[in-house]
Image (cartoon, rainbow, N blue to C red):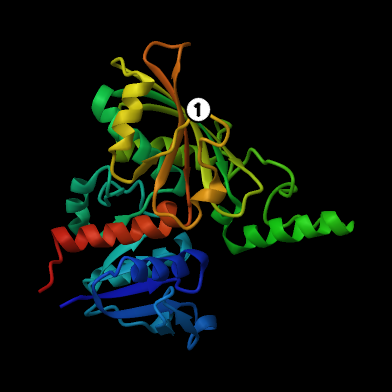
Amino acid sequence: MGYRIVVAGATGNVGREVLAILAEREFPYDELAAVASSRSQGDEIEIGDSGKTVKCQNIENFDWSGWDMAIFAIGSDATAIHAPKAAAAGCVVIDNSSLYRMDPDVPLIVPEVNPDAIDGYTAKNIIANPNCSTAQMVVALKPLHDAATIKRVVVSTYQSVSGAGKAGMDELWNQTRQIFVGDEKDVQKFTKQIAFNVIPHIDKFLDDGSTKEEWKMVVETKKILDPKIKVTATCVRVPVFVGHSEAINIELEDELSAEDAQRILREAPGVVLHDKREDGGYITPVEAVGDFATFVSRVRDDPTVDNGLNLWCVSDNLRKGAALNAVQIAELLGRRHLKKG
């Protein structure tokens, strides 16, 4: 006997990726519903490469009763309306938006990092999925923190345009074409030209000069991994379609050599260590697309601080940063709390 699962926002980038991953991982469902706005009602949506399709329903009048869980990929505003309805009907919500991440009554989960925290979902019947850049970073940090206790993290991100949705991907594509044919560049989604450029600005600016994306990485890392860790982040949008990269500097309480860190990371859940000190001996975003893993490369000692390490971390942001992590949460929820059969 399988689960009854809903994918909310099934027509968007993340929603379609959720459907694909459910099929790839052979998630044990008996019934699957796809819901989105009224514009998509009646559309037939493919469930990955399974050969199956599902007809999209209108989220506005969807009956949530009797469904076991729902993966939400509809943004904070719509989630604020529909998630409480689903949760009240007994359907556990796994939310990809930022709405509930810092709610003390809502667990923020990366299954490889803090699986036990999911037990707190009963307070609101809602589980939060972290920010894409945070998710991949904490997967890489967790085994090192367990081994030598992380004191401080300095991270610079190189985030793909898919993190801004389809509109971001379209803008990079259109601007690239416009530059090659000599047309005027159309800037709409981003604050400046993104093609052949980098933009040190993701989300809104805060009073202290940081952006909300940078704030998310700080507070979410503390909630997921350890509130004692000091984190500072600079988040940058780069002209890459899919795949976030991060240059991470770590200061540890205890000594941990680069060789020992490599050994630990090689065995860590969710991590693939690809670290050869030669031309091409590292992973780039292009190579991470479509993969489940968080890739770590360029592990080396930082001689400027006591017990310092540097590393390079890459992952498919539509997968581990969103859809995959949400499906892994659904799997974890099923194993621990909603056992079927």
| Residue 132 can be seen in this image | yes
Relative height, residue 23 to residue 245 (above, below):
below
Query: In screen coordinates, is 125 left or right of 57?
Result: left
Residue lying farthest to the front in this orientation: 278
Residue for point 37% across, 72% down: 7
Query: Where residue 58 sits: x, y (%)?
Result: 44, 83
Q: Name the residue furthest bottom.
A: 42
Tell me which residue sits at (45%, 73%) in the image.
10
Q: Picture coordinates of residue 34 (x, y %)?
A: 40, 78
Instruction: Name the residue tied to disc 1.
Output: 277
Q: Is residue 328 above or below residue 33?
A: above
Amino acid type for the residue under numbered disc 1? Arg
Residue 124 in view, yes or no = no
The answer to which quarter of the image holds residue 8 is bottom left
Front residue of 325 and 203: 325
The local secondary structure at tag 1 comes to: loop
At a point 41% along the width and 69% down the height, the residue shown is 20
Q: Position of residue 114 (x, y in %)?
A: 24, 43
